[in-house]
Image (cartoon, helix red, strand yellow):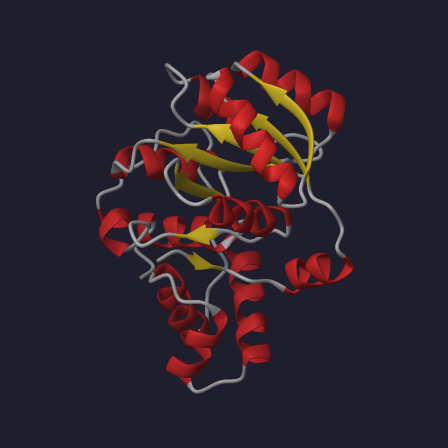
Amino acid sequence: MLRLVSTPAERERETLAVPVRVVVADQHPFARQGLIKLLAESGLDVVGEAANCVAVLKAVELTAPDVVVMDGDMTGVCPLQVIRDLTGGTPPCRVLVLSTSGQEGDVSAAILAGASGYLLKDRPVDEVVMGIRAAAAGGSLISPWITPTLFGSMPEPERIDPDPPPMELSQRELDVLRLMADGKGNREIGEALFIEAGTVRNHVSRVLKKLDVDNRVQAAVRAVREHMI
């Protein structure tokens, strides 16, 4: 079962019923049109579509979406470079990857490139919508196979400019980070540590800031890569 990381921003977005602007990128026309139809029926505002990597960047430039739903099965290294370009742009764009592959290497590569979430293409549309809304709000979907077992098998990424060293975390923040990496939501973290949900949110915000990452998945990846947990 997928775990949805809920954030105050996401709850506020849903309360105000603000439509999330989406670009759908898939190399298969039938799959792309089918997904567009389902997302529109679910209340999302599909503002663009693309069949290849060049078209994705152009569509984002023209429409300024909140989230790009990215076909992770496009050939070559193209999807990973597009994810880097989108999430590192000004302003950055969130990316949710849909793929037929659940292989550890493919999942970790997409997350390390900056994706806010990663789902298999056979998941129900409701889960895809949840992933899009979470990404738009700065959160992420954590799936059962994005776990410490997966993180432990990650190759060290090749980087020209290494990440800056993280600010030191308190023991409580490390406890929260370990539970985040285990896929726990705020309520479960609070129950495990016997603290209130508001306190959990404050700890999570400080952890993300200290690690200089955008979401929980990236925080867990960096923590394991740097042997913090």
Q: Is residue 210 above or below residue 155?
A: below
Name the one closer to the observer, 95 or 69: 69
Residue at 35% in and 66% down: 178
Residue at 60% in and 14% down: 55
Name the one closer to the observer, 214 or 67: 67
Name the one closer to the observer, 13 or 169: 13
Tell how many labels: 0
Quadrant where the image shows the C terminus:
bottom left
Residue at 43% in and 75% down: 189
Residue at 46% in and 41% down: 163
Is 5 positioned to the left or the right of 175 in the image? Answer: right
Residue 164 visible? The answer is no
Q: Position of residue 194 (x, y in %)?
A: 43, 87
Q: Is residue 17 above or below residue 124?
A: below
Q: Is residue 21 above or below residue 174?
A: above
Residue 134 visible? The answer is yes
Q: Position of residue 179 (x, y in %)?
A: 37, 68
Q: Position of residue 125 (x, y in %)?
A: 49, 43
Question: Residue 33 sits in which quadrant?
Answer: top right
Is 211 positioned to the left or the right of 88 in the image? Answer: left
Q: Position of residue 106 (x, y in %)?
A: 32, 32
Quadrant where the image shows the N terminus:
bottom left
Is 155 positioned to the left or the right of 171 in the image? Answer: left
